[in-house]
Structures are given as structure tokens and as C-alpha cells.
């Protein structure tokens, strides 16, 4: 077999995500590219947590409902996931806490034998997984040595006893894929920012964006990146405005509720023409909603957030590789056009793990308009592209004024109707320049069967599952990566020959569908999910097959 | 720069008799002195909120960020963290910094970020034509409280002391030499400096007579004593009949805010760091 799905489940606090990552590393070392989905309720201890790790020789970007190996730290895991078990599923469970059916592992005996802590239960089950998947012990040994930070030997002893306590149930076909780095979507965004010269990251913790803050707080300062966690998201956005005014490349990150607080500052960035990148990772709303589950229900919020009219850039990458690439592009666009620039993500992408193919992360060359330096600098001097030259304090001989009020070219407050109109037109012209830039970017991605007359339309993290389902059904996938300014021409071109469209979204109102309608495309059918859970491949295929012809 | 160069050519629209003129004049004098001492005017950045006070951004021919109501401090913090060589001055109003942006003021003091806040405390919303603010006296009849407020005013000095400010002072626009020395001291203080500047609003809260009867200059107390400072700051509660002390109330040296402890930059290039992270993830 060459497509392995593994579920590991237990209570919060059992370290399920760590067990899932170990399984992902083992797959990676076997030449199988892993993708991990981690499902957890919003609590610290108790409840039911599980991770699904899927490995294939090519990169999987979606999970299947059916699993081939189920690792149960408790009976609950077996009961809750009965629909995922099929005749060839190996169910391996901790015999102290579950009764099967399947193969019980005498975890407490093994731990006692090695005088090991209870938390090493995970290592025991991971070892059992390796045996069940037919992986050799030397692979287990090398992966443990590489990825276990403490007590490696003891963990390994426990793992190998777990290994010996089950039989091999699956034989993975050999794969020659070279192991690639495995990162989360949020980490990919952080890596993209680090590559593209980010100077500062400002954020208030909010799931599912927090792991980007954690990643940059750890890795940013040694590379000269200032990372600030201020009093609230209002301050986050305003601090970012201060950094941008002083010439520092800055990004912020949040989810829907936090972004609500940022909208005042977003309008300021629009009016004052300050480059700010916003990573907006959606979760199930409205309000507190489901903090640890996903959604695509903030597309229209991000499209329209902030009062008044101003240009903005929005991209929605579909996996980690795209996230790394487009976060670079988003930062570049923000500075070239002096606009707020969004990387729209969601929980599945932010907290999902993927292999990242650095050779595919070229980054997109943003050309940008030509801007000289006027002397003495007028911060908002009009130009054919609408973009004014930038300078930052202290700049000898220049007074640099930015302003939230309507202002003249020097940044001085004005209520003069002629000047107000001129400056409004200038900002509008930036939007036209940005539209031309988007036409040069790979803003629409086509996948699945390129000649298919049925097209699945989607955006963001549903890219992977849509492509996999479409390949099975011989459908085409047309996916806009840039959502604002909308690449209407490229999108219509990509639909050439299509007779039937199905819009797949994780929201109730069909927000992509509504956006497409604004650009002259009426979608024929809708497949929606709004319970916070990801579309699994079999489930999406079933839903697509139910769509009338 | 000459005195004339510091002031822009923008038409001034403050009401005749407005306390803002005295603050503007004082700031200009201090800026000129600083320039004489080698501070380049291009390194000064004024950050203003929204309200009558904030027009000062347009009126000075200096770098400025005219922000939103209540939001001077996060913007100023971003600017200062972006470039420690800039001298960042927040001009904020009492409604501005104490109502809409109170959280930011407290956190800026708590962090001891190295910047100065000049609170234009006229104790009324002027630009929105006369509503009560957090420092209006109880019973203040404003347009949103025609029968008088029923809440006590906030004491900004005690608030700042409790929040960790390392320079706390009170000025008054009709005592300009004292105000000038306080502003100069605040700008040269290393850390978070806060001056509550009592100013009259000529149109909606002209308290000149009230202040003239009560103000006196503080002398002889230990400005390094937190206990003394708290007592002095509480002498006048912003509504009842008691003397109003003017001058430096508290000053101490403290660690200046840095988001992370200062460490050497370890990575020569971003590429090295990215390769290191990616390498650890295979």
C-alpha cells in the first residue's frame, strides 16, 4: 500500500499532538510525505483529542475518513471513531485504559519495566505504530534520536517494547521521495516573513493564529525581528502602524474576534497609506464560536472590513508551501503599494502540518510601480500609479507627516473638496495599479482534470481535498489564490470549456459564491460545511456525487 | 531652525483664549533649546490623538503621526521600538487618553517605554462641543449630561503612579516657565514620562478663576519617594476645594521597555536561520 492513514486519540494532556508529530516524522523518514490534522476541544485537560496523520509518496493535503491504523490511548477513541474502522484497520490500544477490539498493548507493564513516566505512553504507542506499518527498528531509533528532546534512550526503550508487542499489519510500498521539512501553515507563514525581511511581528494570542506568534517569538529575535505581544488587538494594529511609519516591515496575526478590534486601525492604515500585513486565520464563528475548529466564514469580513473605501490585497494560500510563498508576496505587495495586505488562512491550514517543498517556494516577483523621491518630501504626492515615494524619520531635510484625517499631499488635514477628491482618486488609482500587478501573479490555480467540464470552485485550505476529490471524479478545480483585487479575467479564462460549476466552501452563506457573482459568474451548485470540521476526501466525493447533473 | 520654522503655515483654528496656544508655545521653546543642544529636529516625532489638542500635529513643522481618538500610545510605542534614536512625544487629550485609550496609557506606563505624554487636560470634550470627560468634576453639566454628571473624576496622576510611570508631573498653561521646565525634564527623562497639563477650554470649561485661586508650586518634597508622590498626587481630587500642586511629583530611573531581553543577533543572514529551522523539521 502507498496511502497510509493513522489516527491517534486520547484525552487532552496526553500529548496527542506530539504522538501525531512522531508518526509524521516516521512517515517522512520512510519517504512518505505526511499531512497531519489535529482535532482538539478548547480545554487543557480531559475531553477527546485526536490527530489524523496521512502519508503518501506525493504530498497529501487532505485527510480520509477511513484510517488504516488506529492508536487508542483510551476506549473513548475506539468508540468515537468506529466509522473510520474498516476490515483491514489495525486497532492498537493501551490495554490498561481500553478493551478493544484490536491488539492490546501492556503499557503500564512496559513503563514499569523501564521505570518510565506516564507521559511516555505515547512513545509506546508510536513504537507499536511503526511495527504495525512495517517500519524497521533502526528507523524508529533514528527518528526518536532526532526529534525527542529529553530522555531519548528511555523513550526509545519504551517504544521498542511497544514495537514488539504488536504484529505488522500493513506493508508500505517503498518510496524514494526524499524527506522534506514538515511545518504547520502558521510556521510556513513565519518562514515566508523571515525570508522576505520582516522587521517586526505584533500579535495578541488567539487560536488558531497563536502558533505564528510563538514561532516568531522563538525564532525572530535572534534574527533581529522585534516581536511584541501588547495589551489587545487594537494596540496590535496601531503599533504596526507605528512600525510602518518608521520604515519597519511589520505583520500582525489574529483570528476573527481579534480582527474585529483591528478594523479601526485597518481603516487608518488605508487612509494613512501604511503597509501592514495581516494574517487572518479563521475559526468557527460568530463570536467566540468554536475556538479550535475551522471555517471559511470571514472572507466577506476581510473583503469589507474597515470604514470608508481603500485598496487592499487579499491572498488565500492552500497549503504550507503556498503559504510560505504568498506570505512573502503579501509583504512585498504591502510595501510596493502602501496598502494593508492579507494572508487569509484558517484553522486547518494554520495548525495543519504539511511537507514544505522549498524548491517550489520561489516567491512571486512583485514588480511594483516606479517611485522617485520628491524633495522636499510630500508624503502623499500624487503620481500616475497613485503610489507616493516613501521616506522615514529621521530623514534630513524632510518633514514626514501621516494623518488619519483627509489630508493634502503634505499630510496636513484638509476639508477642501478639491483636495479631498484628488487624494481619494489617488488612493483609487493605487487599486488600479494593484489590479494590474495581480494580473502578473499566478492568482488563479487550476487543478484536477484540466479538461473537465465540471469545475469545483474553492479557496484556501479546501484546495487539497477539492483537488483529490476532483481527480477521482475527473472534474476540474479552479481556485483563486488572490481574492482582492479579484483576478476576474484569469478566473474566467480558467473556466473555459466548463459547463457546470460546484462551489465548495466551509461556511453557510456561500461567501466565495457571492464574491464570484459580483464578478459576473453565477455558480450552479453549492457544497457547504459549517460544523468546523474539515471535508474528508470520501465525504467530499459523496457530496459532489449528490450534486444533480 | 528659527522660531518661525518650527511652526507650520497651517491656519490655526483653536478658539481665542484656548490653553493649547500656551502648550504649543512651550513646546516650541523646548524644541529650540533641544536643537541648540544638538538634537536634530528631524529626530522628533509628534504623535497626536483626535480632539482639539491633536491639531498641534498640523501646526508644527515636524514629523507627525495624526492618529485616532485614544490611540497615540500604541502608535508611539511602535515608532519608538522601530527606532530608538527618535524622540517620540504623544500629545493626547483627557477624553482621548483616559477614556477611549485608557488601556494603552496604563500599559505604556507599565512598560516604561521611553516616550513622553503631554496630556492636554481641559476636562471637557471640546471638538465634539462640550461633553464630560473622565476628569470632569462631578456634577459637570455637559451636553450628554445636562443635569450634571453623577460620577467622580479620575485622578490621572495617581493612575499613572499606580501603573508604573517613572516620571509624573502636573503643569498648568498659565504657569508657562514651570511648564517649560517640566516638558524639558520629561523629554530628557529616560523612560515613560507623563505630564498632566491643566489647560482651560475657553468655550466649554473655562476654569481659569478656579485654578488661579488654588494652584501653587510644589517645593522641597522627595521626588524619588513613591509614598510622598502618591500623597501629593492625591491632595486634589479634581473636584473638591483643595490646593493644586504644580511641578514634578515623581521621578525614578527604571529599566526601559524592550520586548525581549537584549541579546546578540545570532544569525548573520535570514537564509541561515530559515535553513536551520527547516533542517530541524526533516
Image (cartoon, rainbow, N blue to C red):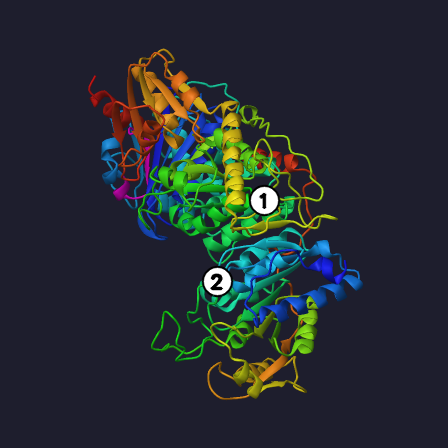
Q: Which mark is residue A149?
A: none
Residue A124 position within the rendered picture, expressed as x and y whole percent measured from the top left: 40, 40
For label 1, count other residues whose C-alpha is less than 10 Å away and answer few (under 14), some (14-19) or many (20+). Answer: some
Report whether B166 appears left or right of A486: right
A71 falls in the magenta region: yes
Is residue A124 visible in the rendered image? The answer is: no
Give whichever of A211, A268 is nearer the camera. A268
Residue B54 position within the rendered picture, expressed as x and y whole percent measured from the top left: 55, 61
Residue A66 higher or lower than B141, as above or below = above
A258 falls in the magenta region: no
Residue B146 higher or lower than B117, as above or below = below
Q: What secondary structure is found at the residue carrying circle 2?
A: loop
Q: CA distance from mark 1 to mark 2?
A: 32 Å
Residue A525 higher or lower than A428, as above or below = above
- Residue B223 in which image quadrant: bottom right
- Residue beneath label 2, please? B101
Segment colored magenta: A63-77
Q: What secondary structure is found at the residue carrying circle 1?
A: helix
Residue B190 position within the rendered picture, expressed as x and y whole percent measured from the top left: 68, 66
Report whether A164 appears left or right of A525: right
Front disc: 1 or 2: 2
Q: Residue at x 62, y 47 (%)?
A: A410
Residue B137 position within the rendered picture, expressed as x and y whole percent measured from the top left: 44, 79
- Asked if the residue under mark 2 is in contact with the one under mark 1, i.e. CB atoms within 8 Å, the reply is no
- Residue beneath label 1, please? A219
Give whichever of A362, A366 is nearer the camera. A366
Quadrant into which the C terminus of chain A falls = top left
Report whether A211 appears left or right of B87: left
Amino acid at each position: 500500500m502507498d496511502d497510509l492513514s493513522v489516527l491517534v486519540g486520547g484525552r487532552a494532556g496526553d500529548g496527542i499532538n506530539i504522538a501525531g508529530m512522531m508518526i509524521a516524522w516516521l512517515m517522512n523518514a520512510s519517504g512518505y510525505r505526511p499531512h497531519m490534522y489535529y482535532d482538539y476541544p478548547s480545554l487543557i485537560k480531559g475531553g477527546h483529542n485526536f490527530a489524523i496523520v496521512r502519508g503518501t509518496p506525493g504530498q497529501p493535503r487532505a485527510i480520509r475518513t477511513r484510517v488504516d491504523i488506529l492508536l487508542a490511548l483510551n476506549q473513548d477513541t475506539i468508540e468515537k471513531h468506529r466509522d473510520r474502522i474498516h476490515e483491514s484497520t489495525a486497532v492498537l490500544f493501551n490495554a490498561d485504559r481500553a478493551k478493544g477490539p484490536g491488539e492490546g498493548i501492556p503499557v503500564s507493564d512496559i513503563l514499569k519495566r523501564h521505570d518510565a513516566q506516564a507521559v511516555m505512553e505515547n512513545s509506546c504507542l508510536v513504537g507499536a505504530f511503526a511495527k504495525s506499518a512495517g517500519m524497521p527498528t533502526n528507523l524508529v531509533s533514528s527518528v526518536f534520536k532526532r526529534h525527542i528532546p529529553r530522555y531519548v534512550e528511555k523513550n526509545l526503550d519504551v517504544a521498542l517494547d511497544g514495537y514488539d508487542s504488536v504484529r505488522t499489519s500493513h506493508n508500505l510500498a517503498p518510496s524514494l521521495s526524499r524527506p522534506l521539512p514538515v511545518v504547520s501553515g502558521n510556521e510556513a507563514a513565519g518562514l515566508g516573513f523571515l525570508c522576505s525581511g520582516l522587521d517586526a511581528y505584533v500579535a495578541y494570542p488567539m487560536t488558531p493564529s497563536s502558533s505564528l506568534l510563538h514561532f516568531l517569538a522563538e525564532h525572530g529575535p535572534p534574527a533581529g525581528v522585534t516581536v511584541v505581544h501588547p495589551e489587545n488587538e487594537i494596540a496590535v494594529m496601531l503599533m504596526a502602524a507605528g512600525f510602518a511609519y518608521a520604515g519597519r516591515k511589520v505583520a500582525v496575526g489574529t483570528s476573527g474576534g481579534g480582527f474585529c478590534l483591528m478594523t479601526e486601525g485597518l481603516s487608518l492604515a488605508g487612509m494613512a497609506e501604511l503597509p501592514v500585513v495581516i494574517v487572518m486565520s479563521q475559526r468557527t464563528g460568530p463570536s467566540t464560536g468554536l475556538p479550535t475548529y475551522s471555517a471559511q466564514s470571514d472572507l466577506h469580513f476581510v473583503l469589507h472590513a474597515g470604514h470608508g473605501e481603500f485598496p487592499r490585497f487579499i491572498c488565500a494560500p492552500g497549503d504550507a508551501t503556498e503559504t510560505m510563498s504568498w506570505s512573502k508576496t503579501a509583504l512585498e505587495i504591502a510595501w510596493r503599494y502602501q496598502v494593508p495586505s492579507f494572508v487569509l488562512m484558517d484553522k486547518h491550514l494554520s495548525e495543519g502540518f504539511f511537507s514544505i517543498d522549498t524548491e517550489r517556494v520561489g516567491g512571486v516577483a512583485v514588480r511594483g510601480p516606479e517611485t522617485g523621491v520628491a524633495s522636499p518630501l510630500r508624503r502623499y504626492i500624487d503620481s500616475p500609479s497613485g503610489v507616493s515615494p516613501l521616506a522615514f524619520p529621521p530623514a534630513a531635510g524632510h518633514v514626514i507627516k501621516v494623518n488619519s484625517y483627509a489630508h493634502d499631499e503634505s499630510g496636513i488635514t484638509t476639508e477642501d473638496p478639491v483636495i479631498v477628491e484628488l487624494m481619494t482618486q489617488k488612493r483609487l488609482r493605487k487599486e488600479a495599479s494593484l489590479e494590474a500587478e495581480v494580473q502578473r501573479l499566478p492568482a488563479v490555480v487550476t487543478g484536477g482534470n484540466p479538461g473537465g467540464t465540471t469545475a469545483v470552485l474553492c479557496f484556501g485550505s479546501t484546495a487539497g481535498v477539492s483537488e483529490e476529490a476532483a481527480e477521482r471524479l475527473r472534474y476540474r478545480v479552479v481556485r483563486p489564490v488572490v481574492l482582492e483585487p479579484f483576478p476576474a479575467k484569469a478566473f474566467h479564462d480558467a473556466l473555459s470549456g466548463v459547463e457546470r460549476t460546484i462551489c465548495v466552501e466551509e461556511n453557510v452563506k456561500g461567501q466565495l459564491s457571492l464574491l464570484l457573482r459580483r464578478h459576473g459568474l453565477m455558480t450552479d451548485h453549492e457544497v457547504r460545511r459549517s460544523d468546523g470540521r474539515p471535508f474528508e476526501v470520501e465525504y467530499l466525493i459523496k457530496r459532489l456525487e449528490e450534486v444533480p447533473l | 531652525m528659527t522660531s518661525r520654522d518650527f511652526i507650520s503655515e497651517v491656519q490655526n483654528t483653536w478658539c481665542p483664549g484656548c490653553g493649547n496656544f500656551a502648550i504649543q508655545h512651550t513646546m516650541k521653546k523646548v524644541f529650540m533649546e533641544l536643537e541648540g543642544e544638538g538634537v536634530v529636529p528631524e529626530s522628533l516625532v509628534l504623535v497626536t490623538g483626535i480632539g482639539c489638542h491633536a491639531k498641534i500635529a498640523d501646526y508644527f513643522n515636524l514629523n507627525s503621526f495624526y492618529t485616532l481618538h485614544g490611540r497615540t500610545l500604541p502608535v508611539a510605542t511602535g515608532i519608538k521600538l522601530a527606532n530608538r534614536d527618535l524622540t517620540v512625544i504623544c500629545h493626547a487629550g483627557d477624553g482621548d487618553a483616559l477614556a477611549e485609550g485608557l488601556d494603552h496609557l496604563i500599559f505604556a506606563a507599565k512598560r516604561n517605554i521611553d516616550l513622553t505624554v503631554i496630556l492636554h487636560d481641559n476636562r471637557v470634550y471640546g471638538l465634539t462641543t462640550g461633553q464630560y470627560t473622565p476628569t470632569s468634576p462631578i456634577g459637570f453639566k455637559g451636553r450628554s449630561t445636562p443635569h450634571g454628571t453623577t460620577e467622580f473624576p479620575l485622578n490621572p496622576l495617581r493612575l499613572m503612579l499606580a501603573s508604573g510611570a517613572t516620571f509624573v508631573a502636573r503643569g498648568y498653561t498659565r504657569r508657562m516657565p514651570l511648564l517649560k521646565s517640566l516638558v524639558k525634564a520629561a523629554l530628557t527623562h529616560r523612560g515613560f514620562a507623563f505630564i498632566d497639563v491643566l489647560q482651560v477650554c475657553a468655550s466649554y470649561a473655562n476654569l481659569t478663576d478656579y485654578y488661579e485661586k488654588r494652584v501653587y508650586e510644589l517645593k522641597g518634597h522627595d521626588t524619588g519617594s513613591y509614598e510622598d508622590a502618591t500623597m501629593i498626587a492625591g491632595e486634589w481630587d479634581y473636584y473638591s476645594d483643595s490646593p493644586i500642586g504644580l511641578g514634578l511629583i515623581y521621578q525614578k530611573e527604571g529599566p526601559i521597555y524592550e520586548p525581549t531581553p537584549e541579546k546578540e543577533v545570532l544569525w548573520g543572514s535570514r537564509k541561515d536561520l530559515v535553513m536551520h529551522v527547516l533542517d530541524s523539521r526533516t
